[in-house]
Amino acid sequence: MKHPLILLILFFLSGLVYSQQEAFEQTGVASFYADKFEGRTTANGEIYFHDKKTAAHQTLPFGSIVKVTNLVNNKFTVVRINDRGPYVNNRIIDLSASAAKELEFIENGIVKVKLELIASTNDIPDIIPEAISNHNEPHYYKIDVSVTIPTGKGVQIGSFKNDENVFRLAERLKSKYNEEIYIEPAIVNNQRVYRVIVGNYNNELHLQKLKNKLTVEYPDCFVTTYKK
């Protein structure tokens, strides 16, 4: 894969509906992959790399985005599920080494954590974890990287109702334009829509060049400023 998808999901939490019945939370012990697993195939056919924010879980669908909080120091990270396991004692998740490092439990090997489902492949991104939804500011989750907050502008190509089509479109846009792709859930006329935004620039010249490029395929695209 020459250009792996780096997909960023914007949850503008003040505008979303939160349903506790749909939330998934789990508390238990987390471990992390040993070095010997580097380069091995995961259960969904990907290759494990220690520097990617991925994880193994016994039941969550592949592609699920999960917030993992270290209950000892309150550090948290966001990972994508691409493997199955762990099947040891009371462990509930096996994290990549980079995710474990971010939670600061490399030396201990295991730690008690809380899992909160942010989004799944079947319902993206309707499930908002309660621990995050108490905030009013936007949150951006960068799959395989870290939590991030874009500060510039991007080019919005449209709003869509079907979340599965949105993520297929995001992959195609990433592959074709090699830009970071943002998805912003919003409520419009009592309906959930997903705004697809390309790029993150502070330079107006670069932004205009990107817009001109996208206009060929998306004539109604326009420049938008990321909310802070």
Image (cartoon, rainbow, N blue to C red):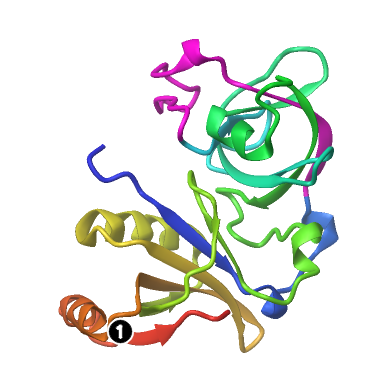
**Which residue is disc 1 drawn over?**
221
Give the left or right position of residue 215, taking residue 150 as reference.
left
Q: Looking at the image, which residue is at 47% across and 70% down?
A: 150
Give the left or right position of residue 215, taking residue 124 as reference.
left
> Vertically, is 195 above or below 88?
below
Q: Looking at the image, which residue is at 70% across and 19% down?
A: 109
The quarter in which the C terminus is drawn is bottom right
Mark 1 burial class by Cα count in 10 Å: few <14, some 14-19, many 20+: some
> Could you say where residue 21 lies in the image, as x and y percent from the top left?
84, 56
> Could you say where residue 18 lies in the image, as x and y percent from the top left?
77, 68
> Vertically, is 35 above or below 205?
above
Q: Looking at the image, which residue is at 58% across and 42% down?
A: 79
Is any part of residue 165 visible from this angle? yes
Is any part of residue 67 visible from this angle? no
> Could you say where residue 184 lies in the image, as x and y percent from the top left?
52, 72
The quarter in which the N terminus is drawn is top left
Figure quadrant of residue 34? top right
> Vertically, is 189 above or below 20?
below
Q: Nearer the viewer, residue 48 or 35?
A: 35
- Magenta stretch containing residue 29, yes or no? yes
Give the left or right position of residue 17, taking residue 80 as reference.
right
> Could you say where residue 27 lies in the image, as x and y percent from the top left?
84, 36
Disc 1 on helix, strand or loop?
loop
* Image label count: 1
Amino acid on which disc 1 is placed? Cys
The range drawn in magenta is 24-51
